[in-house]
Image (cartoon, helix red, strand yellow):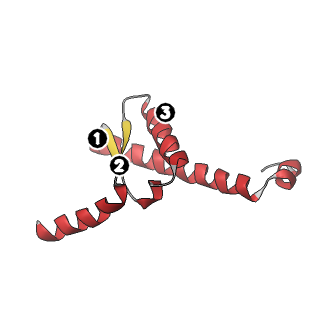
Amino acid sequence: MNSEEARKTATKEDLAKATLVTLTNNIGSLVFSCAVREGVERVVFAGNFLRINPISMRLLSYAMEFWSKGSQKALFLEHEGYFGAVGALLGNVLS
């Protein structure tokens, strides 16, 4: 968006996708940094954000592969929307 021509021809959809890509790549780089610090090789992503968002899933997978040079993998859960509730339940039951 650094040229006036690009700003004039960009649609709302283009801007939405660019925002999604930017945010997802930032999440991927932050998660990678945390994984390196903690010595984690596989990261599991969960949450309703990914339920109908194959673009972000693909970008997170790519980001983890890119930042780690292939040494870390992103994993996604099939029923990801329930794991926050399960974690909260286990946190209260096991505490």
Task: Kindly state the secondary structure of the residue where label 2 is placed.
Answer: loop
Residue 2 in the image: above or below residue 74: below
Q: Which mark is residue 16?
A: none
Of labels 3 and 2, earlier in sequence is 3
Residue 19 in the image: above or below residue 84: above
Label 2, label 1: how far apart the Cα atoms are = 21 Å
Decide: few, some or many residues near mark 2? Use Cα within 10 Å; few <14, some 14-19, many ≥20: few
Give the image quarter of residue 79: bottom left
Residue shown at 59% from the left, 49% from the top = 21
Q: Which mark is residue 40?
A: 1
Residue shown at 31% from the left, 39% from the top = 42
In the rendered image, residue 12, in percent from the top left (x then y), is placed at 74, 59
Task: Kindly state the secondary structure of the residue where label 3 is placed.
Answer: helix
Q: Residue furthest bottom?
A: 92
Q: As shown in the figure, which amino acid type bears the numbered disc 2?
A: Glu
Residue shown at 11% from the left, 65% from the top = 94
Label 3, label 1: how far apart the Cα atoms are = 16 Å
Give the image quarter of residue 41: top left
Residue shown at 20% from the left, 68% from the top = 89
